[in-house]
Image: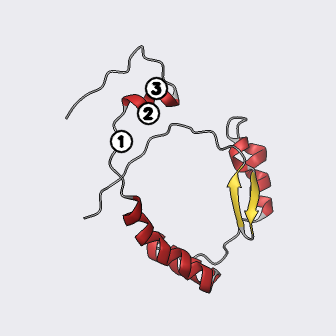
Amino acid sequence: MSRLDLRGAPLTVSSLRAALPRAEFDVEAALSQVRPLVEDVRHRGADALRDLGERFDGVRPQHLRVPATVFRAASSSSTPTCAPRSRSRSVGPGWSTPTSAAPTPRPRSSTAAP
């Protein structure tokens, strides 16, 4: 195991990306896993989403949309640094993306598949 001492170093996104090693990532392998899921959702819609929720999360969601009242309550009680992340813009029927696409360093954990 190697250690990296970042004390005194500027902690910007670009400096962290340059300093921290990244695992190799096989995009084609990932796409071969994701494509069937996307196709299933494309053909079966909400039923496929519920099945995937049950498969991956162990929960079969009754509702796929978060009620507007829940969003309003969350945005009114969130701190100013969190509020921009709760707003979204539409990018297609039933899909949305955060309005702020700025990268934010955050802890991640991952496991390698066999």
Q: Mark 3 or mark 1, which has the lower sequence index?
A: 3
Q: Mark 1 sits on what residue?
A: 22
Q: Quadrant of residue 79?
A: top right
Cα–Cα span, label 2 and label 3: 5 Å
- Identify the amino acid type marked 1: Arg
Q: Mark 3 sits on what residue?
A: 15
The image shows residue 28 at horizontal and vertical percentages of 40, 64
Residue drawn 55% across and 74% down?
38
Q: Mark 2 or mark 1, which has the lower sequence index?
A: 2
The one nearer the camera, 76 or 33, is 33
Please give left or right for residue 51 compared with residue 111 in the image: right
Q: Quadrant of residue 42?
A: bottom right
Q: Mark 2 sits on what residue?
A: 17
The secondary structure type at the circle numbered 2 is helix
Cα–Cα span, label 3 and label 1: 13 Å
Please give left or right for residue 76 compared with residue 45 in the image: right
The secondary structure type at the circle numbered 1 is loop
Disc 2 to disc 3: CB gap under 8 Å: yes
Disc 2 to disc 1: CB gap under 8 Å: yes
